[in-house]
Amino acid sequence: MYDKERGLYIAHCDNGPISICGKMANRHGLVAGATGTGKTVTLQVLAETFCQVGVPCFMADMKGDLSGISQPGRLSGFIEKRMPEFGIENPEFQSCPVRFFDVFGEQGHPMRATISQMGPDLLARLMELNETQAGVLNIVFRVADERGLLLIDLKDLRAMLDYVAKNAAQFTTSYGNVSATSVGAIQRALLSLENQGADKFFGEPSFDIYDLLQCEGTKGIMNVLAADKLMLQPKLYSTFLLWLMSELYATLPEVGDMELPKLIFFFDEAHMLFDGTSKAMVDKIEQVIRLIRSKGVGIYFITQSPTDIPENILGQLGNRIQHALRAYTPKDQKAVRTAADTFRPNPAFNTADAIMNLETGEALVSFLDEKGAPAVVERAKILFPLSQIGAISDSQRDEIIKRSRIWGRYDHPIDRESAFEVLLAESEKAAKEAEEAAAAEEAAKQQAIQEKEQAKADKEAEKKKKGGIGSKILKGVLTAITGAVATSVGSAVVGEKFNGKKTAKRAAKNATSSATRTITRSLLGNLIK
């Protein structure tokens, strides 16, 4: 219920209704209390109250209980008991317009972000990188930016890491050392993220922050994130919500203090945001929380104890609802005292004692007044929800998802050309060129071998050719000599037999001269041939 003068009616105490001032609702808030004390119902009451006045909300649903906000509530014994206390005679049970989201795309519309949108700082936190490894990741992002390469999904980042590692010498001079050890550690962290299902979160179409700021009619839409599976990866859960807050801060224009906020952002299990977070990151979170209220966004942390929130951030949470805390140990007792000290005291009761004695659905409440000052703490009972308490069925959820105005906008992933495809094409081109160069070199080598062998063959042929001519000449000479000798000897024998020795001698001489002429002619003839 909203009244411009009285604000948004949330709780009731002995002094009457307690309401959040609309102009101060963006000054953030805290809902704290032990398990089972009523935090989830309080969150539901806050969310549907904002919904009724046209303020959209975003909330993480840890157990599926908040899905009931999509259905009208009904009368119960608990509500009948509370109605007279709140002065309500006929509650108007009603549902809220709801959109279901799921990082894994199983129980709602997928919510995706690109690697570039997440940025190196949040990714380093998500992967729990040390300072050196985070530095290498920053170099990878810088190189991708300078080359105009889009980092959309995990395979893009993996490809860029491989590229930078292979060309480390080229980048070390300009940006610093890029060690194979650091790159290997980041690659292993990416593999771990992929095994946790983070590959379904990184990609396109990326989520449009303005889809959280929608209304249906006069009611603000309740954006409910299914977080039962996401909770199993605390770093992914908290980093994802931190990214959403950062995107809201970076995207929305300055509006100052409005009559009502643009959006209320509920951060359940808020301690996960700060566990194991570096001081630099906590400082960044503090800056976002401090400045995002000027964008018309209120952030409400839900956690077990105020001590889960760093002191500098706790001081910015002006609207407080504190459910019961248990004090069984000295540490618990200290937490109770710390919680009590965050309230403006009420002389009517002891705040610390009251915290330990609150009943389920009862809380200590203090909201900011119109001037931004915290009101005196009151012991009050939180209103009952007008929507259903508890989870809805799977069929009801499916029906709501399919009739949503954004059905189909995010439900099918898109894989356009990005760093992975570009670097793969470059690698394949380089491999092809190297293959062609190697083939050309091998061809040239084979050509040289063939030419060498051909030259050797030609030389052998020439040698053989020359050897054939000499043999032919020699054969002709021998034939000529043999014939000449035979003729000479024959002439000598005949001459001696018929003419005597003188005549034989003269015949032999004539035969020798004739043989000489015959040999000469034979040599010349063979040479000419």
Image: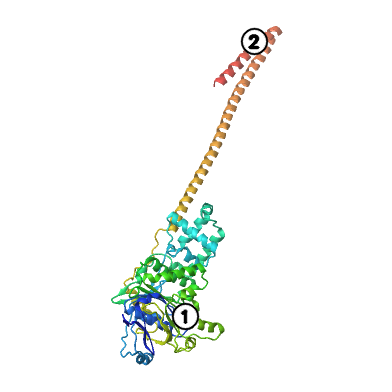
Residue nearer the viewer, 38 or 258: 258
Q: Are marks 2 and 1 in contact (CB under 8 Å)?
A: no
Left or right, 357 with respect to 500, comes to left
Q: Nearer the viewer, mark 2 or mark 1?
A: 1
Q: Can residue 224 be seen from the camera position used here?
A: no
Left or right, 135 with respect to 512, comes to left
Look at label 2 and name its amino acid.
Answer: Asn
Q: Quick one: label 2, few (<14), some, or many (20+) residues within 10 Å?
A: some
Quadrant (top left/top right/bottom left/bottom right) for the C terminus: top right
Quadrant (top left/top right/bottom left/bottom right) for the N terminus: bottom left
Question: Residue 98 at what x, y percent from top left?
Answer: 35, 77
Question: Residue 299 at what x, y percent from top left?
Answer: 41, 74
In terms of sequence position, does the residue under pointer 2 or pointer 1 come before the other?
Answer: 1
Q: Is residue 186 above or below residue 440?
A: below
Question: Residue 356 at what x, y percent from top left?
Answer: 49, 87
Q: Can residue 162 be seen from the camera position used here?
A: yes
The secondary structure type at the circle numbered 1 is loop
Which residue does the numbered mark 1 point to in the structure image?
342
Q: Residue furthest right?
A: 501
Question: Residue 334 at what x, y percent from top left?
Answer: 53, 82
Instruction: Point out which mark residue 103 bears.
Output: none
Which residue does the numbered mark 2 point to in the structure image?
510
Left or right, 403 with respect to 145, comes to left
Look at label 1 and name its amino acid.
Answer: Thr
Residue nearer the viewer, 507 or 318: 318
